Image (cartoon, rainbow, N blue to C red):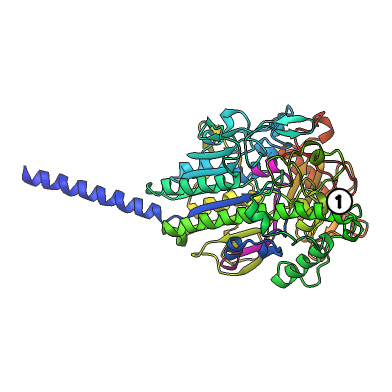
Amino acid sequence: MKKKYSILLFISLALTSFVTFAQKAKDTRPNIILIMVDDMGYSDIGSYGSEIQTPNLDKLASEGLRFKEFYNNAICAPTRASLLTGQYQHRAGVGYFDVDLGLPAYQGFLNKESLTIGEVLRSSGYSTLLSGKWHVGNDSLAWPNQRGFDQFYGVIGGGANYFNNFPMPLNGREYPVVLVENNKRLNPKPDSYYFTNEITDHAVKFLDEQNKANKPFFLYVAYTAPHWPLHALPEDIAKYKGKYDKGWGELRKERYARQQQLGILEKDSKPAERDPSIPAWDNLTYDEQKLWASRMEVYAAMIDRMDQGVGKITNKLKELKKDDNTLIVFISDNGAEGGNYTLGGRGKRFNSGPVGTAGSFDYVYKNWAHVSNTPLNSYKGNMHEGGISSPLIAWYPKKIKANTIAKGTGHLIDLAPTFYELAGAKYPTQFNGVTTNNLVGKSLVPVFTGSTQIVNRNEPIFWERAGNRAVRKGKWKIVADHQKPWELYDLEKDRGETTDVSAQYPEVVRELSFDYIQWSARTGVVEYETIKPRTAPGPRTETPREPTVIRGTN
């Protein structure tokens, strides 16, 4: 009997040791933090040429990797659809925006065939945490906790006042703000918080709570800063008083020069031509200059506060002793928002307080957005480089060499396969009885680890949104505004898209346009004119070619 008991005890101890070993082995997988900001231009942080104080992001850049070329989908909801699923946004169901246009590719929320990073990593044993902005499904069945996230705090829709959750004025109507924590609606007292701080604080709280679990985590921090409206804390605004009195022309030159010094741009690169509809700073009156400078002071303060939040998150990592085994990736969802400022427009009509306060619904418009997007052409919503290019910083002490810069040429669809490779997570062909869409991106791990300088893929990268479209293949890019002919640019020589060479290389245009037709057919893209809504649900974004009054919250 004693012998039998001893055998059972030995087996029990062996099994316990095996489980413990397996748990410890599982815990060696990296934690992953994905940080995305909203409507921030390519040059708006220090490590990409800005004068704005972003020491925490700059530290991650100096200790990690920067991409010269990383692409998004030009506007909020489609970007988030690709980011979260690793699919082109039409394939994920958000081809236009978070509204239903009557077709599966344009249903306005993530379909079940496109698994979120939260769903895949949670199934693989990760804690999944989200703090910030969702914007890929308004119905509660499509909220974060129902799509793979253990913890969620933030707004469901496209934006919010930074000091309260009141509906926001938008195109003559009220835009509802749905603030939620784990499926429970929140109604905080007005002026009792600043939303950027709340996003940071909840991210830190989630990390503290998750520390009790014996497993790695995926944390997605989706800041709304510096998205409209311009709201910032007085102490942050004070840092930038007078910094923008020199005007947009001078600031753009300074940023361009710093980008060349930093190695983000080539020495012989040519910046995009100045938007002719933007007035020269010296042609403004003194009062006009002061008003425009105050807008940019607040915009800078919003980015500054976001960077302070990044510092709090990285400090928490160190406190938890998890900083040596965590990948951090930082991106923006699109370029800075353009648009024209006109008397009687959104800013003037709704303001009930100075710029920066809760009563202000002002923005920087294209006058400053063309500085934010230095040296690139155009703005948010457009498929020229200024609309679809983002900084990318990747920091991971175990694998990424410090202070490196790569060409990169990555896209949002590449992040999910990157995370799955590092996490050892298998992307399932079936999930809850549904056959899943195949992943179409490529892992960025070879670029992160320095084995290559550019993502090696078998086909081009494609874009379409509201009739604007583009294809990137090697050094070539074709791009077209709504219902206009294709333009062609050699991005190795002309990142600013200053010289259309479509007439010189018609065979390249034919090849890439044929690629686009094939991609459209298999992805579910349809002609925008056949499905476009009568009234835009959010901001319509213009291009410098056809000045339009454009405002909204996406």
Image quadrant in which the C terminus is located: top right
Task: Count residues near mark 1 (Cα–Cα under 10 Å), then give few for <14, some for 14-19, many for 20+.
Answer: some
**Highlighted magenta segment, given as a residue range:** 61-80
Q: Position of residue 297 (x, y in %)?
A: 72, 55
Q: Is residue 500 above or below residue 343?
A: below
Image quadrant in which the N terminus is located: top left
Q: Is residue 514 above or below residue 352?
A: below
Q: Position of residue 490 (x, y in %)?
A: 82, 61
Q: Nearer the viewer, residue 328 or 199?
A: 199
Residue name at image x 81 percent, y 51 percent? 291
| Residue tagged 1 | 510
Q: Position of residue 48 (x, y in %)?
A: 69, 63
Q: Position of residue 61 (x, y in %)?
A: 60, 64
Residue name at image x 46 percent, y 60 percent? 323
Q: Nearer the viewer, residue 414 or 390?
A: 390
Secondary element under disc 1, as helix, strand or loop, is helix
Q: Amino acid at mark 1?
A: Arg
Looking at the image, residue 247 sits to the left or right of residue 305; the answer is: right
Q: Is residue 201 visible?
A: yes
| Residue 79 lies in the magenta stretch | yes
Residue name at image x 65 percent, y 51 percent? 234
Looking at the image, residue 176 sits to the left or right of residue 284; the answer is: left
Q: Is residue 117 visible?
A: no
The image quadrant of residue 524 is: top right
